[in-house]
Image (tube, grey):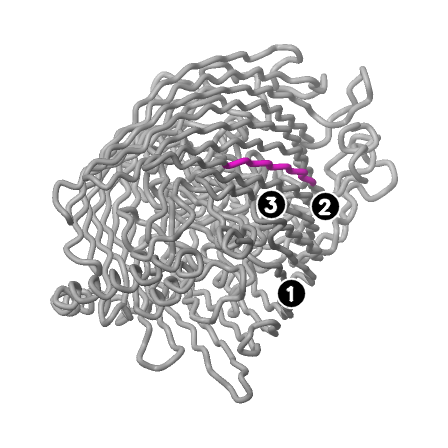
C-alpha cells in the first residue's frame, strides 16, 4: 500500500486534474508502454486498458498520418532551409525527479487553460522549457529564457520597476515603478506583474511555459501581451537528490544548487532546494577618479579629488535562495501543496550594468552637463566610466551613508509562500491558490554613466501583495464542460527616491548637498470573476468561449520629503499629489478548434487583454507635476490568431505555425522628457502587432540526433502616436516640433514607425546529439544560434540607440554514465561575445547619448553534478 500511495507524488501537480496522467497524452508506443507500467503498479486493470486503447488509437491514425505527412513536411522545410533554430532539444535521458519530455514535445503537459493538456493539443501559441533544457544551458536567471524561447526577452532595468519583459514586440517600461508589466509572471500559481523577481535566482525548476498573446481569461487581470509560468519541482516517490557546482569564467562566478526530495509517509512528500552564487562582475570601469574644475562649491572640493574612482569591476552579485515544498495527498480526491521561497540578493545596483551604446554623430565620448568624459566611450564593449559619489555628499546624505561609502549597491529580500489545494468531487475539481509576495528592495548608483557622477540616485521599494483565487473545472464525459472562478488581490507598496543633480550649495537647514528625497505610497485592490464553456459539437470540433470581469481601485500619495533650498524646479516639500481611480473591464475571448487526427490540430481564436492604468512613481517630482500628468490610462488589446500544430513521420517531426494580429490601445510607455528632465509615462494612442511564427523539431533517423528550428516575423508599429516625447538633442529638422497651445512643449510623431525593442525577424536553429560510448558512458553535444534583425533599443527612437542585427552562438557538451548519477559539462552561451542592447534610454545630463543594458556577454561554465 505504501508503494502505491507514494506513486501519487510522481509527478506532484497542483492543477485542476486528477493524480493519474491520462495515457492518451502520450505520443508513441514506447512512451505509452512506460506509462502503462506506472499505471499498472497503481491499478493492474488500467495497464491492459491503456495499451488496448493506445493500439486502437494508433490504428485509427495511420490513414490520417499519411495524408498530413506531405503537408507538414513541406511547411517545416521552409524553416530548416533558412538559418533556423528554436528551443533546444532535450533528448538526453532524464534524471530521476525531472519532468520527462521527449524530443517532439508530445509528453509535455501545460496548464494554459487551467487544465492539464498536452502542449501539442492546446489551442494556444505556447512554448515549454523543461528541466533538461534548463540544465543543459545552466539557466539560473529568467534573462536566459530567450535562448530557448526566442520571442521573449527578460531584461534588467536601470531603476523604477527593475525589469522589462517583452513578448512579440510588446513591453512595459522599467523606468517607472508605478507601471505593471504587460507580460504576467506566474510563479507556482502566484501571478505578479512586477519585475523584481528577475534578479532572484531561478533554480530547481520543473518547467517554464511561455504563452504568447493576451491571456486574460485564465491568468489574472494583467496579461495583455502574454504569460510566463514557472513551475518548481515537487516531491518524488522515493528519496533522491542532486548537487551541482559550477564556475563561469567571464563573471568569475561560482555557484551551487542542490535538492533532496522524497516521501514522508504514504500521504506526505517533501522537497528542499537551495541555490547560491557569487560573481565578481564583467564590466570594467575605466574611471580612475576625476577632479572637476567646473565645480566650485568649497564643501565638495574638500579632500582634493572631487569624484572618487569607482569599483574596477561592475555588475558583481551575490544570490542565496531556498525553497521548501510540502505536499499532501489523502488518496481520496484531495491534495495540497505548500511552497515557501526565500531569496536574498545583493550587488552593485542595476545602474552598474549600464553602458553608453551610442553618441550623437561626430562624438566618440559621452558628456555630462556639457563636459566630455575623458574615460568613456560610445559603444557596447563591457567597458564603462562610472565614478562614486563625492565623500562630502555621502557624509551629508543619511540614506546613502547608512548603506555604504558612496559606491553603487543593491539588495533585495523576497519571501513568497503559496498554498495550492485541489478537491476532486466527481467530475468537478475545485482549486484554491493562496499566495503572498513580499519584497524589500533598495538600490543606489551612478545615473549618468560618466566619471563625473553628475547624477546619482537611490530608490527603495517595500511591497506586500496578497493573492487568492478559487476555481472549478469540470471533466464531464459529455460534450459540454466549464471552468469558472474568481480572484482577489491586495497590494501595499511604498517607493522612495532620492537624487543628486550636481553641485549645489548646502541646504542651510541641515547641510545636505543632494537635491531631493521623495516618498510615494501606493495601494490597490482588485477582484475579478471569470468563466469559460467548452462544447464539442462533433468528436473533433470544439468551441470555447468565456470572459473575465475585473474591478480595480488604485490610490497614490506622492510628495517630496526633502528639497534642497538651492535646487530649483522641484515640487515643494509637503505638496502632495493624491489620486484615486477605479477601473472596470470585461475581457472576452473565443476559440474554435478542429482536430482531424491526433497528429493535426487547427484553431482560430479571438482574444482581448487588459492592463489597468495607474499613477507614475517618478524619480523626480518636478514643480510642473500634477495629478493629471502623473496619471496614465488602461492598456487594452484585441485581435485574432490562427494556428496549427502538427506531427508527421511517426511523430518524429512536430511543429506549429501561428499567424496573429493584435491592436493595443493606450500602450503604456515611459521616456525622458527632455524639457523637464523627468521620466514620465504616457499612453501611445494605438499600436498594431502582427506576424507569423513557424517552429518545429525533427528526431532524425540518426540515433540520438534531434534538430530544431524556428522562423518568426513580427511587425509591431505605432498606428497613432503623434504626441511622442522627443529624444535628447532632437531638432525640428529631425521631427521635434512645438506642441500646439504650449510655449515650451515639444513632441515628435512616431505614427507608422516600429515599436522599440521589436525586431522584425528572429531566426533560430540548432540541435542536440547524444552519442553512446563504450562501458555504458555517453556524450551529449548541443549547439544552436539565434539571429535577430535590427531594432531601436530606446522608446524615442534616438538614432544613437539603434541596435543592428546580430547573431548569438551557444554550444555545450555533457559527459555522464548511462545511469546519469553524475556528469561533467562545459556550457557555452554567446560564444562569439556579441554585444547587443536589450533596452536603452536617453542618458540624463547628455546631449543625445543613449545608455543601455547589454545582453549577457560570453559565458563559459564548467559544471559537475552528482545525483542520488
> Is 158 on the left or on the right of 112, as rendered?
right
Q: CA distance from mark 2 to mark 3?
A: 44 Å
> Is 638 on the left or on the right of 840, as rendered?
left
Q: Residue at x 34, y 57 (%)?
A: 46
In depth, the one of 442 and 93 nearer the eye is: 93
Magenta span: predominant SS is: strand
According to the image, label 1 marks what residue? 248
Q: How many C-alpha atoms fall within 10 Å of the one at disc 3: few (<14), some, or many (≥20)?
A: many
Q: Residue at x 29, y 46 (%)?
A: 124
Q: Residue at x 69, y 41 (%)?
A: 410
Q: Nearer the viewer, mark 1 or mark 3?
A: 3
Residue 266 drawn at (x, y percent): 57, 49
Give the mark nearest the N terminus, 1 or 2.
Answer: 1
According to the image, label 3 marks what residue? 325
Q: Nearer the viewer, mark 2 or mark 3?
A: 3
Q: Are marks 2 and 3 in contact (CB under 8 Å)?
A: no
Q: Nearer the viewer, mark 1 or mark 2?
A: 1
Identify the image quadrant of residue 764: bottom left
Q: How many C-alpha atoms fall within 10 Å of the one at disc 1: few (<14), some, or many (≥20)?
A: some
Give the mark nearest the N terminus, 1 or 3.
Answer: 1
According to the image, label 2 marks what residue? 387
Give the mark nearest the N terminus, 2 or 3.
Answer: 3
Amino acid at each position: 500500500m505504501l508503494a502505491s500511495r507514494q506513486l501519487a507524488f510522481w509527478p506532484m501537480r497542483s492543477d485542476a486534474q486528477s493524480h493519474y496522467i491520462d495515457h492518451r497524452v502520450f505520443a508513441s508506443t514506447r512512451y505509452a508502454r512506460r506509462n502503462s507500467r506506472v499505471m499498472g503498479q497503481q491499478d493492474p486493470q488500467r495497464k491492459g486498458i491503456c495499451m488496448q486503447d493506445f493500439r486502437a488509437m494508433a490504428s485509427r491514425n495511420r490513414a490520417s498520418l499519411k495524408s498530413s505527412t506531405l503537408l507538414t513536411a513541406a511547411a517545416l522545410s521552409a524553416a530548416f532551409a533558412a538559418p533556423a533554430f528554436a528551443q533546444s532539444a532535450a533528448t538526453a535521458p532524464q534524471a530521476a525527479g525531472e519532468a520527462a519530455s521527449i524530443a517532439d514535445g508530445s509528453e509535455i503537459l501545460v496548464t494554459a487553460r487551467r487544465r492539464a493538456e498536452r502542449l501539442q493539443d492546446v489551442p494556444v501559441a505556447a512554448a515549454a522549457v523543461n528541466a533538461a533544457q534548463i540544465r543543459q544551458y545552466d539557466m539560473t536567471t529568467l534573462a536566459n529564457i530567450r535562448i530557448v524561447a526566442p520571442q521573449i526577452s527578460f531584461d534588467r532595468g536601470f531603476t523604477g520597476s527593475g525589469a522589462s519583459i517583452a513578448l512579440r514586440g510588446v513591453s512595459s517600461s522599467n523606468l517607472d515603478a508605478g507601471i505593471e508589466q504587460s507580460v504576467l509572471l506566474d510563479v507556482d500559481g502566484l501571478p505578479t506583474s512586477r519585475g523584481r523577481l528577475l534578479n532572484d535566482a531561478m533554480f530547481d525548476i520543473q518547467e517554464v511555459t511561455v504563452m504568447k498573446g493576451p491571456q486574460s481569461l485564465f491568468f489574472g487581470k494583467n496579461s495583455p501581451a502574454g504569460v510566463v509560468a514557472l513551475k518548481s519541482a515537487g516531491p518524488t516517490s522515493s528519496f533522491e537528490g542532486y548537487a551541482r557546482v559550477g564556475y563561469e569564467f567571464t563573471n568569475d562566478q561560482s555557484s551551487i544548487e542542490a535538492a533532496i526530495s522524497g516521501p514522508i509517509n504514504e500521504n506526505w512528500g517533501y522537497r528542499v532546494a537551495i541555490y547560491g552564487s557569487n560573481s565578481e562582475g564583467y564590466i570594467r570601469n575605466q574611471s580612475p577618479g576625476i577632479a572637476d574644475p567646473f565645480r566650485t562649491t568649497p564643501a565638495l572640493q574638500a579632500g582634493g579629488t572631487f569624484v572618487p574612482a569607482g569599483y574596477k569591476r561592475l555588475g558583481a552579485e551575490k544570490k542565496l535562495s531556498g525553497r521548501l515544498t510540502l505536499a499532501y495527498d489523502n488518496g481520496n480526491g484531495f491534495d495540497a501543496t505548500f511552497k515557501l521561497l526565500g531569496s536574498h540578493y545583493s550587488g552593485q545596483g542595476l545602474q552598474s550594468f549600464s553602458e553608453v551604446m551610442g553618441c550623437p554623430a561626430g562624438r566618440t565620448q559621452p558628456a555630462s552637463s556639457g563636459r566630455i568624459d575623458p574615460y568613456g566611450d560610445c559603444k557596447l564593449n563591457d567597458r564603462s566610466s562610472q565614478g562614486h559619489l563625492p565623500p562630502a555628499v555621502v557624509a551629508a546624505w543619511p540614506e546613502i551613508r547608512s548603506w555604504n561609502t558612496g559606491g553603487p549597491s543593491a539588495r533585495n529580500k523576497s519571501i513568497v509562500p503559496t498554498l495550492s489545494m485541489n478537491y476532486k468531487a466527481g467530475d468537478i475539481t475545485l482549486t484554491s491558490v493562496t499566495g503572498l509576495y513580499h519584497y524589500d528592495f533598495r538600490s543606489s548608483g551612478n545615473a549618468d554613466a560618466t566619471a563625473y557622477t553628475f547624477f546619482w540616485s537611490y530608490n527603495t521599494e517595500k511591497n506586500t501583495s496578497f493573492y487568492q483565487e478559487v476555481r472549478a473545472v469540470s471533466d464531464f464525459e459529455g460534450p459540454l464542460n466549464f471552468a469558472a472562478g474568481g480572484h482577489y488581490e491586495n497590494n501595499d507598496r511604498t517607493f522612495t527616491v532620492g537624487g543628486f543633480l550636481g553641485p549645489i550649495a548646502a541646504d542651510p537647514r541641515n547641510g545636505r548637498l543632494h537635491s531631493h528625497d521623495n516618498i510615494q505610497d501606493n495601494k490597490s485592490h482588485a477582484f475579478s470573476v471569470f468563466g469559460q464553456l467548452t462544447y464539442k459539437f462533433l468528436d473533433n470540433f470544439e468551441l470555447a468561449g468565456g470572459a473575465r470581469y475585473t474591478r480595480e481601485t488604485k490610490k497614490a500619495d506622492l510628495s517630496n520629503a526633502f528639497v534642497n533650498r538651492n535646487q530649483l524646479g522641484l515640487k515643494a516639500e509637503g505638496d502632495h499629489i493624491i489620486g484615486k481611480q477605479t477601473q472596470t473591464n470585461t475581457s472576452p475571448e473565443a476559440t474554435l478548434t478542429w482536430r482531424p487526427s491526433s497528429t493535426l490540430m487547427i484553431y482560430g481564436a479571438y482574444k482581448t487583454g487588459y492592463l489597468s492604468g495607474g499613477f507614475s512613481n517618478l524619480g523626480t517630482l518636478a514643480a510642473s507635476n500634477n495629478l493629471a500628468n502623473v496619471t496614465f490610462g488602461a492598456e487594452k488589446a484585441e485581435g485574432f490568431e490562427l494556428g496549427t500544430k502538427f506531427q508527421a513521420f511517426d511523430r518524429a517531426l512536430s511543429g506549429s505555425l501561428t499567424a496573429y494580429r493584435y491592436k493595443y490601445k493606450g500602450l503604456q510607455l515611459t521616456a525622458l522628457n527632455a524639457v523637464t528632465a523627468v521620466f514620465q509615462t504616457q499612453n501611445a494612442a494605438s499600436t498594431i502587432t502582427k506576424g507569423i511564427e513557424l517552429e518545429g523539431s525533427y528526431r532524425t533517423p540518426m540515433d540520438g540526433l534531434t534538430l530544431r528550428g524556428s522562423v518568426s516575423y513580427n511587425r509591431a508599429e505605432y498606428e497613432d502616436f503623434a504626441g511622442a516625447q522627443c529624444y535628447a538633442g532632437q531638432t525640428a529638422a529631425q521631427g521635434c516640433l512645438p506642441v500646439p497651445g504650449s510655449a515650451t512643449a515639444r513632441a515628435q510623431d512616431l505614427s507608422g514607425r516600429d515599436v522599440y525593442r521589436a525586431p522584425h525577424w528572429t531566426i533560430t536553429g540548432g540541435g542536440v546529439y547524444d552519442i553512446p560510448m563504450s562501458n555504458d558512458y555517453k556524450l551529449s553535444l548541443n549547439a544552436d544560434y539565434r539571429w535577430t534583425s535590427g531594432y531601436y533599443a530606446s522608446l524615442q527612437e534616438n538614432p544613437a540607440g539603434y541596435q543592428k542585427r546580430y547573431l548569438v552562438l551557444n554550444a555545450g557538451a555533457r559527459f555522464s554514465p548511462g545511469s546519469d548519477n553524475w556528469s561533467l559539462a562545459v556550457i557555452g552561451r554567446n560564444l562569439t561575445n556579441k554585444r547587443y542592447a536589450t533596452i536603452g534610454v536617453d542618458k540624463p545630463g547628455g546631449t543625445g547619448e543613449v545608455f543601455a543594458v547589454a545582453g549577457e556577454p560570453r559565458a563559459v561554465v564548467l559544471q559537475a553534478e552528482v545525483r542520488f
